[in-house]
Image (tube, grey):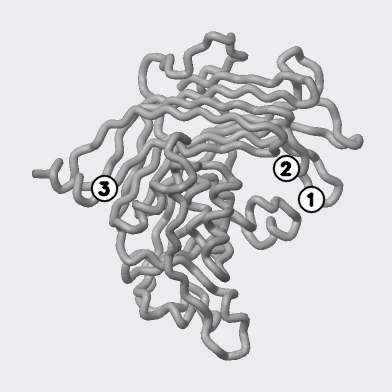
């Protein structure tokens, strides 16, 4: 009985890029501000009539899990500015506006610029409380309070959830503890090591300042350059995912490390197996694999596994391998992480 019930409330998906962009055609309803002289489009967020519609949309976005396609989909919704649109700008101003690094590209596409979304009769908003990321939830009938500028903490019947984006201290970058090597060309990405990984939330990776041959990465206009790679695992009450990301960053004079320059070519592969968990139900095992490549880009990221449910869903990898290769101005940078 538990397995049957689980199938009815849980949607899980693995991400690949073979479904085509024709799936990205549906528009979701948006809500606008009140007519009091404010920009009526300034506070828009997406409204999904139920969890099934949210799940269906995420599944469609997963079929074309690249930044350009996701941005085009978000732009179909008049007046809507996604969280990802601000984050991907990667400017001094965007870092001031958004203090939370949300690695999941699909979730970043459906959240508005303030971290807000509505599913059925509940509005959710991502925010920071006492230096920790949280998710506020409250009845949709109080949506006008948000439009009028009321803080989520001041909305009636608000419930505050801790979310799995990180652990204390504030937004740590977990050091890589898996087996890390420069891979041979024939390395199989799904070659798992023995045992299971210790569960972690947030981002787990490293910073690379040198090429595979040991030479320092070539500077750009005299400024130092590095590769930032990581695997992620996030939990968002109604949504959870795991994925991988590689970014090229430059140490800018005013903004610090920012993704303002491009890799000539980058390819990534990831493989994971584990379970999808909802409290009170039988765990659903998964095995998922994803690969992607791009040229002249500053970032590439893919969601390898996602799951959605009405309450506290969790993607829990038991093994999580990640392999990538970057060509930057003729220099080769590659790693294979097995955990």
Looking at the picture, how far across and down is residue 54, in whole percent? 36, 57
Looking at the picture, how far across and down is residue 116, in whole percent? 48, 65
Q: Which residue is mark 1?
A: 255
Q: Is residue 38 left or right of residue 56?
A: right
Q: Nearer the viewer, mark 1 or mark 3?
A: 3
Number of marks drawn: 3
Residue 259: assigned label: 2
Q: Secondary structure at mark 2?
A: loop
- Out of 271 and 80, give the one closest to the viewer: 80
Q: Which residue is mark 3?
A: 10
| View extreme (front): residue | 22
Tell whether label 3 touches label 2 (CB within 8 Å).
no
Task: Say few, some or many: other residues with alpha carbon within 10 Å of mark 1 (under 14 / 14 to 19 / 20 or more).
Answer: few
Residue drawn at x 35%, y 69% as measured from the top left? 122
Q: Secondary structure at mark 1?
A: loop
Task: Say few, some or many: other residues with alpha carbon within 10 Å of mark 3 (under 14 / 14 to 19 / 20 or more).
Answer: many
């Amino acid at each position: 009985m538990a397995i049957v019930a689980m199938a009815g409330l849980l949607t899980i998906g693995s991400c690949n890029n073979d479904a085509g962009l024709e799936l990205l055609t549906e528009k979701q309803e948006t809500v606008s501000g009140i007519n009091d002289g404010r920009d009526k489009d300034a506070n828009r967020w997406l409204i999904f009539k139920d969890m099934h519609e949210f799940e269906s949309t995420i599944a469609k976005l997963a079929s074309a899990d690249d930044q350009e396609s996701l941005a085009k989909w978000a732009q179909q919704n008049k007046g809507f500015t996604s969280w990802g649109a601000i984050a991907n700008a990667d400017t001094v101003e965007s870092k001031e506006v958004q203090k939370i690094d949300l690695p999941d590209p699909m979730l970043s596409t459906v959240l508005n610029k303030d971290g807000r979304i509505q599913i059925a009769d509940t509005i959710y908003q991502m925010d920071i409380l006492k230096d920790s990321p949280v998710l506020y939830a409250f009845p949709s009938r109080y949506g006008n309070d948000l439009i009028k500028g009321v803080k989520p903490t001041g909305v009636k019947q608000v419930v505050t959830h801790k979310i799995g984006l990180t652990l204390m201290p504030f937004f740590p970058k977990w050091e890589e503890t898996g087996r890390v090597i420069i891979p041979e060309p024939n390395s199989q990405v799904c070659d798992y090591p023995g045992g299971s990984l210790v569960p972690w939330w947030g981002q787990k990776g490293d910073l690379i300042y040198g090429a595979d041959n040991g030479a320092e990465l070539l500077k750009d206009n005299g400024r130092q350059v590095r590769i930032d790679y990581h695997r992620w695992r996030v939990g968002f009450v109604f949504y959870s995912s795991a994925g991988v990301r590689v970014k090229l960053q430059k140490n800018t004079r005013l903004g610090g490390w920012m993704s303002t320059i491009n890799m000539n070519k980058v390819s990534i592969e990831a493989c994971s197996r584990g379970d999808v968990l909802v409290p009170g139900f039988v765990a659903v095992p998964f095995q998922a694999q994803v690969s992607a490549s791009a040229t002249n880009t500053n970032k590439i990221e893919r969601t390898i596994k996602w799951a959605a449910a009405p309450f506290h869903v969790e993607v829990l990898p038991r093994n999580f391998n990640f392999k990538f290769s970057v060509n930057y101005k003729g220099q080769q940078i590659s790693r294979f992480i097995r955990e």
